[in-house]
Amino acid sequence: MLGFQKTREWVYPQSIQGRFMTIRRWTFAALHLFLFAVPWIPVGGHPALLVDIPHRRLFLLGQSFTATDTLFLLLFLLFLAFALFFFTAVFGRVWCGYACPQTVFLESWIRPLELWIEGDRSQRRRRDAGGWTFDRLWRKLAKWSAFLAVSVLLAGAMVSIFSGARPLWTGQASPTAYGFMAVLSLLWFIDFFWFREQFCNYLCPYARFQSALTDDESLLISYDVERGEPRGRGKAAAEAGNCISCNKCVVVCPQGIDIRDGFQLECIQCARCVDACTSVMEPLGHETLVRYSSQAADEGRTVRRIRPRMVVYGGLLTAILASTVVLLLTRVPFEVSVNRVPGSSFVVDADGWTRNTYLLKVTNNGTAEVPVDYEVALEGLTGADVTVESIELLPTETQTVPMIIRLPAEAIDARSVPFDVRITSPQGEVLVAATFLTGASDANR
């Protein structure tokens, strides 16, 4: 690793097969399917997921969200935060080992490419230690070229969420989108080419604060010291079920650590060491010495299935999820604002009626490709006369029209009168509060 000694100790993780590697591969496949397929799937005329930053819109599964829906963003971020707290408290660093993009991309793309082009651990180490030869050079160039292609592909998939997959891959996206794609490609290439496990060890803050999120009963990968020690070699150690010092759990570790040294911040709980130890101990007729466990279980204490922090985090997650569902079910897919014309208050017309002028702004957040009519009505202004243009909007369209309200003198008995503007469409209705100024006190002086 790159440390204060200014040296880099390259990690050459050996490939490994096993139950947890199979689980991870399926998890990685599902995450890749989401990343690559969702921006291409049309729902309601837009991608299933599109974050349209220039127009400050989010299209999600046929629904359109704007800046006025920031509450949903807040709920989403809170849900992610407490989900991280909850799952870390229960399953430890399951995010790092099974869902972090760094892990997913390294395990899905980079290590298989490295294995295919340069061979497994021993071949790569021997070739790298032997100095530069033609064989080493062409393999390195081929590998780095493949890394660059993967970086561009992954960066494009990520930027597709923000620019749309079809415009991006057909050359119709904005220069800004391609600029971000180039920067992201470069960052991924540097990571694949050189940085790798150092990102987890030096940059990622998760490893630093995970200790505050876990307790003695959180799941982690640990070495069974009681069964494994004393270590040995040969038939006696194998028959006793002790660690036979094969070091397979070490050579498969992508972080370059020895799990037998106890809990370490560098461990991302990828379970490669579990599969490695299982592949050695099961043929010998023993259970694996490296397994998912907890500190409490290792010390012989009772592990509680339900703990206070799980109840708190779970309760908050449930409350956030329920609030989001209720808000989504009651959400109307259009926005309305009513504002007085700047600089105006009221005008008394020649016929004695008092006139207020407003600006009525309506935005259609729906995604259906049909125009929608909006009707305007007043509540709380008896005898009022309202003049407003007809409003018909296409999806994502906004229209601002003047709204003139007149009130006869006999209907005025206060300096200001609160009222509501009701906007109705086939999508639902919205009620907006406003105030009508009469100047009644001034007239009585």
Image (tube, grey):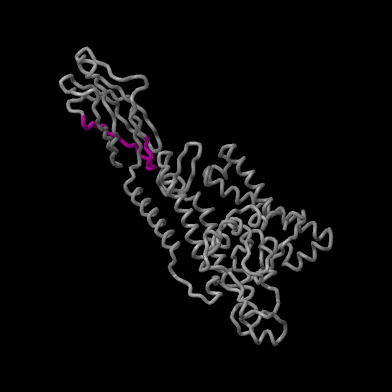
Residue 362 belongs to the span the image colors magenta = no
The part of the chain drawn in magenta is: 363-380
- Percent from the top left, x then y, of residue 301? 51, 75
Q: Is residue 381 above or below residue 128?
A: above
Q: Is residue 305 left or right of residue 270?
A: left
Q: How many marks?
A: 0
Identify the residue at image location x=60%, y=59%: 103
Q: Which residue ends up furthest to the top in the rendered image?
A: 350
Q: Is residue 297 left or right of residue 199?
A: left
331, 120: nearer the viewer: 331
243, 272: nearer the viewer: 243
Q: Is residue 10 left or right of residue 308?
A: right
271, 82: nearer the viewer: 82
Q: Which residue ends up furthest to the left in the rendered image?
A: 410
Q: Is residue 251 left or right of residue 366?
A: right
- Percent from the top left, x then y, of residue 88? 51, 61
- Percent from the top left, x then y, of residue 425? 28, 38
Residue 402, image quadrant: top left
Quarter of the image with the N terminus in it: bottom right
Query: Would residue 305 be seen by someone viewing this image from the given angle?
Result: yes
Residue 364, image quadrant: top left
Quarter of the image with the C terminus in it: top left
45, 343: nearer the viewer: 343
Query: Would residue 278 be seen by someone viewing this image from the given angle?
Result: no
- Percent from the top left, x then y, of residue 42? 45, 48
Identify the residue at image location x=50%, y=63%: 89
Residue 373 belongs to the span the image colors magenta = yes
Q: Is residue 237 above or below residue 378?
A: below
